[in-house]
């Protein structure tokens, strides 16, 4: 059986993408901003990676611009207050909101922000 291990995000501007994800609390060294491939490993071993469009073109020969949202990424927060805090940090830094924090009927505090490449990023916490 194959085991999910890594989610990769294709980015136009690595430095801008990593700046956004640092606002969500990911500890990614600043020297990674100029790399074409960056990985972040969670304490549980799961990996999140970013690859530049240029790298995808090198690997695949081309990279057609995606149309629409085909992947969801949700960030588990420690508390409902952290959802609100991260949402404020991201939007105060000039990034876009898709949906302001709300209390979802499935008993989670939820918000949705948009990363620099247009991906919807969910922020959530259990009540």
Image (cartoon, rainbow, N blue to C red):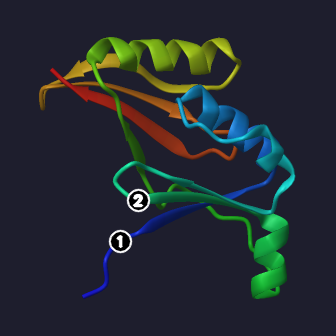
At horizontal 74% and vertical 73% (from top left) the residue drawn is: 64
Assign the C terminus to one quadrant of the image. Answer: top left
Picture coordinates of residue 34 (x, y %)? Answer: 87, 51
The image quarter in which residue 27 lies? top right
Left or right position of 29 against 74 = right
Does residue 93 lie above or below 69 as drawn? above
Q: Are the two marked residues, 2 and 1, in contact with CB atoms closer than 8 angstroms?
A: yes
Which quadrant of the figure contains the N terminus?
bottom left
Task: Give SS at disc 2.
Answer: loop
What residue is pinned by disc 1?
4
Residue 118: % across, % down: 63, 44
Which sits in the foreground, 109 or 35?
Answer: 35
> Dot 1: few (<14), some (14–19), or many (≥20) neighbours within 10 Å?
few
> What residue sits 66% from the left and 33% below the top?
20
**Residue 33 placement, left or right of 39:** right
SS category of the residue bearing label 1: loop
Q: Where is residue 120 in the image (x, y as percent from the top left)?
A: 50, 42
**Dot 2, how many residues are within 10 Å of its Cα: few (below 14), some (14-19), or many (20+)?**
few
Front in this rendered view, residue 62 or 49? 49
**Alpha carbon separation for disc pair 2 and 1:** 8 Å
Identify the residue at image location x=45%, y=12%. 85
Point out the tag, 2 or 1, that comes first from the N-terminus: 1
Residue furthest to the front in view is 43
Q: Is residue 115 above or below residue 66?
A: above
Residue, disc 2: 46
Foreground pick, 24 / 28: 28
Residue at x 72%, y 41% (from the top left corner): 29
Q: State left or right for residue 35 relative to residue 48.
A: right
* Image position of 31 with respect to 5: above or below: above
């Amino acid at each position: 059986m194959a085991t999910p291990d890594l989610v990769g995000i294709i980015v136009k501007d690595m430095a801008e993408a990593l700046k956004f994800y640092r606002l969500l609390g990911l500890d990614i060294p600043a020297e990674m901003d100029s790399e074409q491939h960056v990985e972040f490993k969670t304490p549980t071993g799961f990996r999140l990676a970013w690859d530049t469009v240029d790298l995808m073109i090198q690997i695949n020969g081309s990279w057609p611009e995606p149309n629409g949202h085909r992947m969801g990424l949700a960030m588990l927060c420690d508390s409902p207050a952290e959802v609100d805090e991260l949402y404020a940090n991201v939007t105060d830094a000039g990034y876009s909101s898709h949906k302001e924090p709300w209390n979802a009927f499935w008993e989670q505090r939820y918000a949705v922000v948009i990363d620099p490449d247009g991906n919807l990023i969910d922020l959530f916490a259990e009540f």
